[in-house]
């Protein structure tokens, strides 16, 4: 949160408030600039879904830091999740 607050020029206000307040401030700032905050469902399987083929793994341990799929996709699990979240947000905006 500290790095994010410095990057977005919120100062210490983000660090002093909870995540809910941060989300509200981010929503307000984006609306002020004519943009929209897209909220992807917290149960969306971003880490378990292959960003290449869409297959969802049933089990994925937190200790598995590299995502490997049977289709041959292999990448950092956080990067894989970020791609899935971005694509889900785009899908939600298009709907």
Image (cartoon, grey):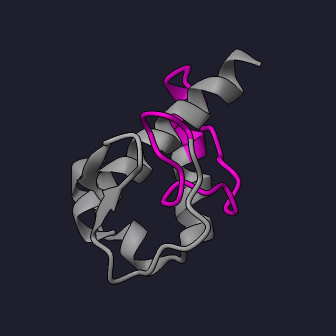
Q: Nearer the viewer, residue 19 or 75?
A: 75
Residue 90 located left or right of residue 16? right
Q: Nearer the viewer, residue 44 or 21?
A: 44
Q: Nearer the viewer, residue 48 or 83?
A: 48
Q: How many marks?
A: 0
Check the image and name the residue furthest to the top. Answer: 94
Residue 33 located left or right of residue 10? right
Tell me which residue sits at (54%, 71%) in the image: 19
Snapshot quadrant of residue 11: bottom left
By secondary structure, the bulk of the magenta-drawn segment is best described as: loop
Quadrant of the image for the N terminus?
bottom left
- Whole-percent x, y for residue 54 in the image: 55, 38
- Whole-percent x, y for residue 40 in the image: 65, 47
Tell me which residue sits at (65%, 46%) in the image: 39
Q: Nearer the viewer, residue 14 or 88?
A: 88
Q: Which residues are magenta?
A: 27-54
Tell me which residue sits at (25%, 51%) in the image: 75
Check the image and name the residue furthest to the right. Answer: 95
User: Is residue 35 on the magenta stretch?
Assistant: yes
User: Is residue 12 on the magenta stretch?
Assistant: no
Examine the rendered structure and indicate whether residue 50 appears above or below residue 4.
above
- Whole-percent x, y for residue 73 in the image: 32, 43
Quadrant of the image for the C terminus?
top right
Examine the rendered structure and indicate whether residue 8 appears above or below residue 37.
below
Check the image and name the residue furthest to the front. Answer: 70
Residue 52 located left or right of residue 36? left
- Whole-percent x, y for residue 62 in the image: 40, 81
Examine the rendered structure and indicate whether residue 71 appears above or below residue 20.
above
């Amino acid at each position: 949160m500290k790095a994010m607050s410095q990057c977005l020029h919120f100062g210490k206000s983000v660090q002093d408030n909870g995540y809910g307040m941060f989300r509200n401030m981010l929503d307000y700032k984006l609306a002020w600039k004519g943009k929209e905050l897209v909220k992807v469902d917290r149960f969306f399987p971003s880490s378990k879904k292959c960003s290449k083929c869409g297959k969802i793994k049933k089990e994925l341990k937190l200790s598995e830091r590299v995502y490997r799929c049977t289709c041959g996709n292999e990448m950092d699990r956080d990067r894989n999740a970020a791609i899935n979240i971005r694509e889900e947000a785009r899908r939600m905006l298009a709907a």
